[in-house]
Amino acid sequence: MKALNTFLFDLERMQSGMKSSSVFSQFLANQDPTLHPQFYLKLDVLMESIQTIRPETVGITIISNNGFVYNYGYSLNMNFTKDNFNKLSWLKEIKKNNLNPLITNLHTREYSNMDKGQKVYSYVQKVWDKKLRSYGYIVIDFKPELLQNILNNELDSAHSSGTFIYNAHSFVLSPDRSSHISFDSVQNQKTGTTIYTNANMKYLLFKQYNAKTKWYVAEYFEVDEFYKPVNEIKLIAWLITITSVIVCILAAMVISHRISRPIKKLQQVMINVKNGNLDQKFNFKSKDEIGELGRGFNEMIVQINKLIKSVSKEEKLKKAAEITALQLQINPHFLYNTLESINSLARIKKEYEISNLIVLLGRLLRLSISSFEEKIPINQEVMYIESYLEIQKVRMRDPLEYSILLDDGVKDCLTVKLILQPIVENAIIHGIDPLRTAGQVNIEGKLVDEFIVFTVEDNGKGINPEELEQIRDRLKNKSEDLSKYRKKVGLYNVQTRILSHYGETFGISIDSKINKGTTVTIKIPKEVCDDNEKNANC
């Protein structure tokens, strides 16, 4: 209650200004009746300056304990003595409070000569002279309208149904309009309480306590009127919320339809494709996610059609290859049986060298037709190489020696079929034969990490640098074309088959020096036979 506290502060300033004056102190200390009139003029000058703080006051009274009374701003009843003042109830109350000021309840001015019936509030405080030997009471009167205006400016009078201002004993300020509820119902309730009247009215009660005046200000409001602004805001909020929900639902329906329509269309296209109709196309030109999905689906259908045509073509080629393989299998069988007949004849004629060659050749034929699998165990590949080298030893006029060294475990691994024989054949025909001297071929197979590395080394004539670079370039860039179209079945054929099975990380590398020989290195991944392969080939 800022305005009320400001008013009380002004009253305190007024009494403080009086107390600080030497004239005021002398008045309290005076005990001589003959000197009493002399203080009136001096005190009037003081009071005139003091009253400028609160011009609304209607009288200032000073009562000393020596029995003298001073009045300012009104006509004093000369018959109203100090004893009469001491009998006033509010003066008795200030005596109990000692030095604490007091604002009285509304009372009449019996000490006034002209307007005894006028009702006023009074600010009362006990004061001492500067030597603290005499004391008295300062009484500052003000009309109830002043207090009412101060309180009304602070209270929400526009919406309030009524106000009670009271202290511990009685009313200080009665309601300024017809009260709808009784003072007892207000006094006994806490702030925030809802009060019900006999007329089925509901009021909200709010209280404030002022420590300086020791007053309670109780203001009550009709519930419907009090919550009217809140209810209006709630109504507006509900209208806005409902409108927003309706707009959102409509917007969601429109957006959902725009999104679901192309999705349903795409779904139908997918169902048609699922049923085998691959000529479908999703026609939707938007650039959003659905459009991107549709374009991706169309590209997928195109690729599927290409793959179907490719698979169909490969199936036809595979069937043709199988028929050709079956046909070709007849010739090795015929030759093998024929060689067996020749071998029997050679043994009868005791041509044991011829018989041995026929046996070796037959073994080669048997190994070549024993399996049509792409990959075979390395031990089978080595058996084929041994038979081939034995035949070459008999064929060659000059001695041929060879060695085959394999790390433990290499023989049990798989390799692409016939990758060593063409390399060995090249070493003998192009490297050793032209020298017409004793030849040496060394074959090694090593495990290096997860790889298998074969080396085929000969002591032949070697390859000149220009031709070696040409061979290396062909191995790197042209092996497939050379083996497919130019019928190069040796080095390039092996390189092509290794790349097709294992990728570009693997393959053949070659080193050579003139008159010192050539070394061919083959690198393939380590691949162990599984159970099915062991049953079939391993």
Image: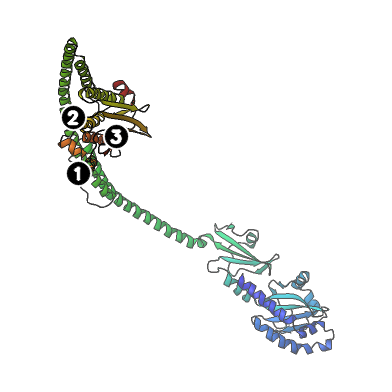
Q: Which circle, 2 or 1, is nearer the viewer?
A: 2
With respect to residue 365, does 71 lie above or below? below
- Residue indicated by mark 1: 281
Can residue 450 be spotted in the picture?
Answer: yes
Q: Nearer the viewer, residue 121 or 469?
A: 469
The image position of residue 102, as x and y in percent, is: 72, 72
Q: Residue furthest front?
A: 437
Q: Residues within 10 Å of mark 1 (few under 14, many from 20)?
A: some
> Rounded to the nearest whole Å, what is the CA distance between mark 3 and mark 1?
49 Å
The image position of residue 376, as x and y in percent, is: 28, 26
Q: Residues within 10 Å of mark 3 (few under 14, many from 20)?
A: many
Q: Disc 2 or 1, which lies upstream in sequence? A: 1
Q: Which circle, 3 or 1, is nearer the viewer?
A: 3
Q: Identify the mark at residue 522; answer none if there is no mark.
A: 3
- For label 1, the SS is loop
- Residue indicated by mark 2: 318
Q: Which image quarter: residue 94? A: bottom right
The image position of residue 427, as x and y in percent, is: 24, 32
Q: Residue furthest top?
A: 348
Q: Which image quarter: residue 138? A: bottom right
Whether residue 238 sits left or right of residue 337 in the image: it is right
Query: At x 68% / y 72%, what residue is drawn?
Result: 106
Whether residue 299 sits left or right of residue 173 in the image: it is left
